[in-house]
Amino acid sequence: MGVPPDPASDTRSLSSRLCVSRSFYDLEFRNQIGRHVRMESLTSAVVNESDFQAAHENVQRQLKLFAELGVPVGSDAVILDFGCGKGNTVYAYRKLGYKAFGVDIELRSSFFEQLLRQEGLCTPDEEIFRSITTDDHAIPFDADSFDYVVSSVVFEHVQDYSRALSEIRRVLKQGGKSFHSFPSRYTLVEPHVHVPFATVIRNYAYLYLWFSTLGRTQLKGRSVKEAASSSSAFLKNSTNYLTKKQIVQHVNTHFGNIEFVGKQLWKNSTGRYKILYDLLSKFGFIKAVPLAAFLHSAFGRRSIFFVK
């Protein structure tokens, strides 16, 4: 596998690499997506075209963000996707020439692991995806293994912040960087059960009221009781929305530093956030960006950065 030039030594390399990657995703994937997606019958996770594009855009944001923060990802960087899910982000990083790995409690990455091997993006003996142990929640890699640890929409599921951050610190090299983006405690609509204010109000009675009135279109064949019961159980057992103060306390305990980087993420994002940032800039309201980013962080998504 060819190694791309180091972005730290060539300011154009990151931009050039992302442009080449976008061309690949827009053209080759559209031509071959049918062949790839037919492989999904071999896996437990459903894969579609949006998984490829979403991962590509996610990696773009992360690479541009690190460059914006003055810590560009070098060509020899080793990256861990914490909570890798299907493995599409790991695949997107490897398509760009980076040495990326993924961990999760429940691996659903067989499709992308097979694709990585078919395309020669890893060595035959590389264990790209590994399971986090459920007894002690250890990350199954040696200490000081990674230059970067990243995650997207994962930390709202972490039940033991202290243990997770302790393990991230252990596997990061000295000076290693970590970036995580996840829904805020006060996001207006809980992103998994799609119920307003359910990040905070998660009791059965509230959910029953929602599904029996404004949320009836979300039932999809379930009874109101079934929808309320399953949503309440999921929220209580599989989510953990902390306040900003609690997040800061946990991260500072293990790293001694934390930066909320919503503004920088907006600047280097795509879609509606990028459009809003560009509009504010174009019409002379650039000073409003920090306030908009603050509101989005409080009521939308937290984006945190810290260094070992």
Image (cartoon, grey):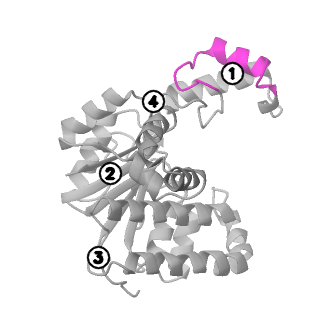
**Quick one: label 3, few (<14), some, or many (20+) residues within 10 Å?**
some
Q: Amino acid at mark 2?
A: Ile
**C-beta proximity under 8 Å, tags 2 and 4:** no
What x and y, as percent, mark residue 8? 27, 75
N-terminal-most mark, 1 or 2:
2
Q: Gap in Å between the C-alphas at discs 4 and 1?
A: 19 Å
Q: Residue furthest top?
A: 205
What x and y, as percent, mark residue 57? 54, 63
N-terminal-most mark, 2 or 4:
2
Circle 4 sits in a helix, a strand or a loop, which is it? loop
Q: Residue at x 46, y 37 (%)?
A: 156
Q: Which residue is mark 2?
A: 139
Relative horizontal placement of residue 253, taking residue 118 as reference (left or right):
left
Relative horizontal placement of residue 17, taking residue 245 as reference (left or right):
right
Query: In the rendered view, would you say 8 is above or below 192?
Result: below
Query: In the rendered view, would you say 251 is above or below 197?
Result: below
**C-beta proximity under 8 Å, tags 3 and 1:** no
The magenta span reads 196-216
N-terminal-most mark, 3 or 1:
3
**Quick one: label 2, few (<14), some, or many (20+) residues within 10 Å?**
many
Q: Amino acid at mark 1?
A: Ala
Residue 143 makes an appearance in the image: no
Q: Amino acid at mark 4?
A: Tyr
Q: Which residue is mark 3?
A: 76
N-terminal-most mark, 3 or 4:
3
Residue 214 makes an appearance in the image: yes
What x and y, as percent, mark residue 252? 21, 37
Q: Residue at x 72, y 19 (%)?
A: 210
Which is nearer the eye, 251 or 203?
Answer: 251
